[in-house]
């Protein structure tokens, strides 16, 4: 990488050369070759591939050549060079000088500025600089903020002594390659590096999608049962339903043949081999780890680890109420064990972790029929302390039993009100005859590492003080972040690892529960024709839903989009059933007649991407918009899909084990994108679950990145689907002036058009314009990568790859619209009778 902090001797040598050229009468070529070239490459660090030397310029029938045109994927800078003897004597002493000042109104400097400005406007560059090797004047052209050229300010370095020596740091901070690709010119000359200052997003114009269909559905009649069956919290609270819903089958896919990509797992975070509640013994076998704890033995210390949404809380609830039901049965007198569950989801940072834990324990004790009873537990727990007080400080009250009891009562009440001393004494007594488990869950809800560390320390201290077994559940990443802490370093934990379950199996069990809850329930519904009809057995509606999701493209879409997060899969399924128009009476009639009904995949895609929003918004959707990186700069807008495509291309081989983030950063830096921009892109992709760091550690440039199946399906399937493009277009900044006006005008016509076929023709035109524009803009990145001799991961256009699928989809969708809604004439025009005959056959 070029040295952006050159040694003073090079700067002094260049200053001396400049003096020699002036006195010897050197020409412009001498100035460029001996001075300016060296400054641009050796001082400022620009690479050979960044330059377009002597580029021809035709204007008014005359040809000329640009001295230097520097371009990267994100920035363009034109430099007009003059020989050293050209008089730039009017350059002001100010670092920032207004272009309307007298210094820029006459002489050779004025001519050079206007020449550079006109060349810059012709070539459409962002910034220009003029120099005679000594003075440097840098200014913007082609501004989008409507500021006139005369109202623009320039950054000025009066002499080479200033630029290369006295004010070298400022010079580098403005014009070095590293600074420029990080937005220095925009920041210093325009006041900010964003060039997307208008509201060019369709969701700023429309608050509801044209694709929302008004259709009578049966969902309201089965909503309560569906919500119960697909709610993690409600299922966990009901042991009978939990036992029916629990899935022990893990997702073991290693290579997805549909999208041809390796499915790489995250690294093992534990040093020893953990127990896994899958396979022959399953959760009941692993649950024996809890129920085998003996009172007189060393208390258990156990970590329960897994990815977000993998089912750690569900497993703990399963152990308590199903596999360990007899062990934790509190109706027994006395019970064999206590399950002291502390949930940090409702933790308030105004409290200490210790206070939060003791509050949960105190609530358990107060509600428990034995632990909260004075005769059964409280009196025996304080028996030794009362005896010591009676023999000691309260010995003088032995003769007055009423006064003695009053004083003892005050001491007990004081500890009760403090909480911690009271809980500690009760549990210390109970743990002598019963196994007591302190279960700490959802530590991940607290993001601050210092608070997490305090939670672990307090939990261990409380468990030791009262002789409790300790169970801590957390995500892999939380454990990795804290495993070097004193708690995990000094305390020996066994571990249980919760693998993400097979999503289709989870959904199958939830549909079975819904079927059971709706068995023989009747309800009335209004058909599409307006008539009231009765559904005699609501469970048949669930049969239709189940058959249309499990093992279908819809089910696979939910599975892939969830990326192993069961809670997300359940939420998406529930939202799809509610908002995807899957429960229309028309669909139910078709199911009763044929025994099957396939949900239109486009309705599933749209419903899942919308969630509970009335229009697509990237930040609220489980599927991100790959066409807008939200950087505020048009040049980097398509970096999401560009990086995603590179990740999927790398993951094509079965030997793939990830790609280093530093490799991505380096490649994009060669193209002209700063590490700041690239790191934002990667961080957003991780947050959106399209890739992850194998090590579970927080993302850094040393991370090894792996794409998820969701990434693969977006790049290799969804990019070519009409419904996906029509959805994400609403939250895509469309910076091309002509494209924006055409799409905005076309969308206005879509909302106004009532005829389905005519409206689809407009939609088809908009989608094609959008697709063509995306392909064109992504191709610019590919060309830049090719120019830098980057590998095929970066030079292949994913949009071009999906064009045949996209055009085929447009044709199929159009034929479907004509077949279902078109006139006889329209159907005849596209030869639909032939297709209808094939359907009949």
Image: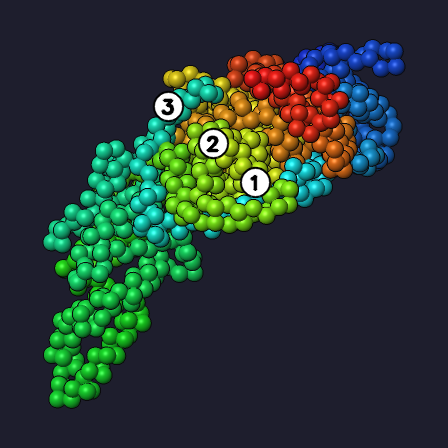
Q: Nearer the viewer, residue 761 or 44?
A: 761
| Res. 669 visible in picture | no
Question: Which one is earlier in the sequence, the residue at label 1 or at label 2?
Answer: 1
| Res. 496 visible in picture | yes
Question: Which one is earlier in the sequence, the residue at label 1 or at label 3?
Answer: 3
Relative to residue 796, is residue 383 depicted above or below? below
Badge nearest the viewer, 2 or 3 = 2
In what element is the residue under mark 3?
loop
Determine which quarter of the picture holds residue 271: top left
- Residue 526 in percent (x, y) is at 59, 46
248 to the left or right of 346: left
Disc 2 crowd rating (10 Å Cα; few below 14, some 14-19, many 20+) is few
Q: Nearer the viewer, residue 443 or 138?
A: 443
Q: Residue at x 21, y 66 (%)?
A: 370
**Distance CA(mark 1)–CA(mark 3):** 38 Å
Disc 3 crowd rating (10 Å Cα; few below 14, some 14-19, many 20+) is few
Q: Which residue is mark 3?
A: 254
Q: Which residue is mark 1?
A: 584
In what element is the residue under mark 2?
loop
Disc 1 crowd rating (10 Å Cα; few below 14, some 14-19, many 20+) is some
In what element is the residue under mark 1?
loop
CB under 8 Å between discs 1 and 2:
no
Q: Nearer the viewer, residue 679 or 798?
A: 798
Q: Which residue is mark 2?
A: 595
Q: Residue at x 60, y 40 (%)?
A: 617
Q: Residue at x 36, y 31 (%)?
A: 251
- Residue 662 in percent (x, y) is at 47, 25
**Distance CA(mark 1)–CA(mark 2):** 16 Å
Determine which quarter of the picture holds residue 71: top right
């Amino acid at each position: 990488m070029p040295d952006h902090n050159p040694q003073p001797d090079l700067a002094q040598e260049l200053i001396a050369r400049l003096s020699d050229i002036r006195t010897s009468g050197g020409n412009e070529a001498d100035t460029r070759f001996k001075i300016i070239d060296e400054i641009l490459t050796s001082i400022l660090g620009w690479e050979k591939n960044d330059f377009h030397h002597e580029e021809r310029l035709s204007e008014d029938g005359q040809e000329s050549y640009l001295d230097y045109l520097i371009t990267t994927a994100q920035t363009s800078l034109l430099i007009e060079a003059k020989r050293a003897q050209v008089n730039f004597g009017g350059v002001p002493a100010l670092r920032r000088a207004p272009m309307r000042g007298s210094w820029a109104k006459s002489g050779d400097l004025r001519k050079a500025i206007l020449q550079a400005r006109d060349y810059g406007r012709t070539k459409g560059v962002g910034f220009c600089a003029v120099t005679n090797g000594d003075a440097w004047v840098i200014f913007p052209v082609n501004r989008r903020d409507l500021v006139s050229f005369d109202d623009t300010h320039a950054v000025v370095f009066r002499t080479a002594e200033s630029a290369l020596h006295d004010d070298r740091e400022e010079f580098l901070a403005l014009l070095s390659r590293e600074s420029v690709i990080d937005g220095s010119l925009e920041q210093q000359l325009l006041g900010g590096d964003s060039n997307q200052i208008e509201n060019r997003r369709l969701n700023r114009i429309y608050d509801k999608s044209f694709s929302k269909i008004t259709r009578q559905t049966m969902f309201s009649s089965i909503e309560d049962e569906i919500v119960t069956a697909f709610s993690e919290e409600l299922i966990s609270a009901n042991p009978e339903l939990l036992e029916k819903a629990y899935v022990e089958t893990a997702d073991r896919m290693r290579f997805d043949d549909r999208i041809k990509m390796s499915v790489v797992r995250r690294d093992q975070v534990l040093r020893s081999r953990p127990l896994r509640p899958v396979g022959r013994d399953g959760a009941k076998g692993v649950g024996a780890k809890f129920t085998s704890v003996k009172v007189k033995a060393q208390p258990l210390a156990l970590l329960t680890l897994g990815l977000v949404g993998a089912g750690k809380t569900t497993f703990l609830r399963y152990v308590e109420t199903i596999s360990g039901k007899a062990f934790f049965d509190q109706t027994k007198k006395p019970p064999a064990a206590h399950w002291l569950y502390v949930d940090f989801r409702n933790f308030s940072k105004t409290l200490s972790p210790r206070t939060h834990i003791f509050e949960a324990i105190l609530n358990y004790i107060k509600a428990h029929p034995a632990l909260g009873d004075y005769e059964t537990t409280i009196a025996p727990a304080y028996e030794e302390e009362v005896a010591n007080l009676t023999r000691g400080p309260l010995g003088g009250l032995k003769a007055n039993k009423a006064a003695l009891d009053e004083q003892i009562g005050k001491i007990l009440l004081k500890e009760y009100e403090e909480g911690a001393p009271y809980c500690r004494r009760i549990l210390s007594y109970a743990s002598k005859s019963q196994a007591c488990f302190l279960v700490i869950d959802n530590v991940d809800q607290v993001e601050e590492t210092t608070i997490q560390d305090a939670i672990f320390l307090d939990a261990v201290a409380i468990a030791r003080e009262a002789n409790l077994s300790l169970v801590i559940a957390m995500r892999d990443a939380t454990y990795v972040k804290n495993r070097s802490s004193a708690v995990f370093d000094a305390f020996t934990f066994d571990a249980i690892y919760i693998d993400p379950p097979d999503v289709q199996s989870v959904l199958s069990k939830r549909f079975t529960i819904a079927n059971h809850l709706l068995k023989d329930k009747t309800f009335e519904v209004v058909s599409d024709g307006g008539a009231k009809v009765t559904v005699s057995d609501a469970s048949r509606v669930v049969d239709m839903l189940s058959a249309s999701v499990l093992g279908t493209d819809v089910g696979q879409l939910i599975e892939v989009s969830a990326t192993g997060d069961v809670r997300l899969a359940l939420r998406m399924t529930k939202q799809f059933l509610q908002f995807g128009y899957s429960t229309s009476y028309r669909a139910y009639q078709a199911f009763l007649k044929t025994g099957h009904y396939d949900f239109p995949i486009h309705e599933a895609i749209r419903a899942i991407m919308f969630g509970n929003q009335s229009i697509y918004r990237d930040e609220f959707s489980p599927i991100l918009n790959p066409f807008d990186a939200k950087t505020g700069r048009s040049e980097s807008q398509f970096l999401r899909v560009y990086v995603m495509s590179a990740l999927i291309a790398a993951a094509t081989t079965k030997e793939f084990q990830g790609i280093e983030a530093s490799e991505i950063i380096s490649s994009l830096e060669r193209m002209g994108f700063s590490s700041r921009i690239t790191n934002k892109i990667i961080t957003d992709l991780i947050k959106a679950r399209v890739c992850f760091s194998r090590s579970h550690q927080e993302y850094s440039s040393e991370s090894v990145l792996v794409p998820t199946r969701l990434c693969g399906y977006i790049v290799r399937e969804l990019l070519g689907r009409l419904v996906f493009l029509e959805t994400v277009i609403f939250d895509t900044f469309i910076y091309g002036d002509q494209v924006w006006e055409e799409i905005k005008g076309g969308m206005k016509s879509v909302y106004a058009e009532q005829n389905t076929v005519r409206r689809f023709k407009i939609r088809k035109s908009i989608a094609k314009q959008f697709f063509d524009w995306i392909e064109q803009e992504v191709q610019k990145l590919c060309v830049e990568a090719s120019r830098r001799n980057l590998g095929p991961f970066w030079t292949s256009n994913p949009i071009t790859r999906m064009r045949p699928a996209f055009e085929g989809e447009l044709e199929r969708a159009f034929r479907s619209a004509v077949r279902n809604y078109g006139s006889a004439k329209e159907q005849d025009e596209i030869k639909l009778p032939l297709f209808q005959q094939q359907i009949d056959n």
